[in-house]
Amino acid sequence: MNEVEKKVLGMSPEELAGMREDLSVHEAAHAAAYLYHGIGLRYVSIEGLEGDCGCEPTPVYPTSALDHVVIGLAGDYACQYQMEGECVPVPFTWIREHLDRVKEHCSDDHDLIVVFEYLEIAQRLETGATLEELYYEAEEQTIRLIENQWDAIYRLSRYLYELGYMTGEQAEHVLESA
């Protein structure tokens, strides 16, 4: 039994619905970010209460590495926007410390791990930029994306909540029609 299954066993139906709603917003934002950056989306899913987006393979170059950082950040910022009505910037030092805790406790914060992998790729490909500078650039892009695309992200999250799984084509259609 994995950690998600253990957590779910102790939840009320209302808590379970809230978790599913948060997950649908989180994954809808990842899907919207993929499509916004021109990366083909194969599917988006919240089945089994573990979210996932499948994308088409893409070559990595400086701009696309930063695009993947935005994609990785989009889920958490969308959840924050839904709860608080705004995206509040998170200090790089906090993100760095959280990553260290994730590594230390062998936690599986997949989004954070991906964010740092792509930050490091972007830093290697981009001359002279620090991880912190690249992070703040990606964070600013993420906040703009969430704020500008919120209605479409929220609409997609409603469909995802109800359906549990959507093809990339279905998700794209919902986002475009918002």
Image (cartoon, rainbow, N blue to C red):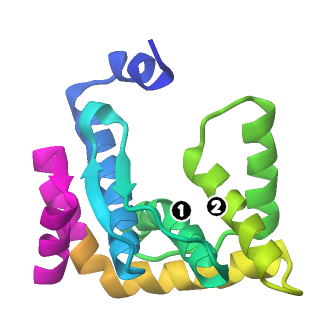
Q: Residues within 10 Å of mark 1 (few under 14, many from 20)?
A: many
Q: Which residue lies under the disc numbered 1? A: 72
Above or below, 51 against 160 in this view is above
Q: Nearer the viewer, residue 56 or 178?
A: 56
Q: Which residues are magenta?
A: 154-178
> Residue 127: within the magenta?
no
Q: Quadrant of residue 49?
A: top left
Specify the quadrant that holds the N terminus: top left
Do the residues under discs 1 and 2 have CB atoms within 8 angstroms?
yes
Instruction: From the top left corner, tell me how far across and down residue 63 is, in percent.
Output: 61, 84
**Residue at position x 67%, y 69% from top?**
90
Q: Quadrant of residue 115?
A: bottom right
Q: Secondary structure at mark 2?
A: helix
**Residue at position x 22%, y 62% from top?**
168
Left or right position of 176 against 85: left
Q: Residues within 10 Å of mark 2 (few under 14, many from 20)?
A: many
Q: Which residue lies under the disc numbered 2? A: 115
Specify the quadrant that holds the C terminus: bottom left
As drawn, the label of residue 136 is none
For residue 126, say whether it is visible.
yes
- Whichever of labels 1 and 2 marks the residue nearer the N terminus, that label is 1
Left or right position of 133 against 109: right
Q: Secondary structure at mark 1?
A: helix
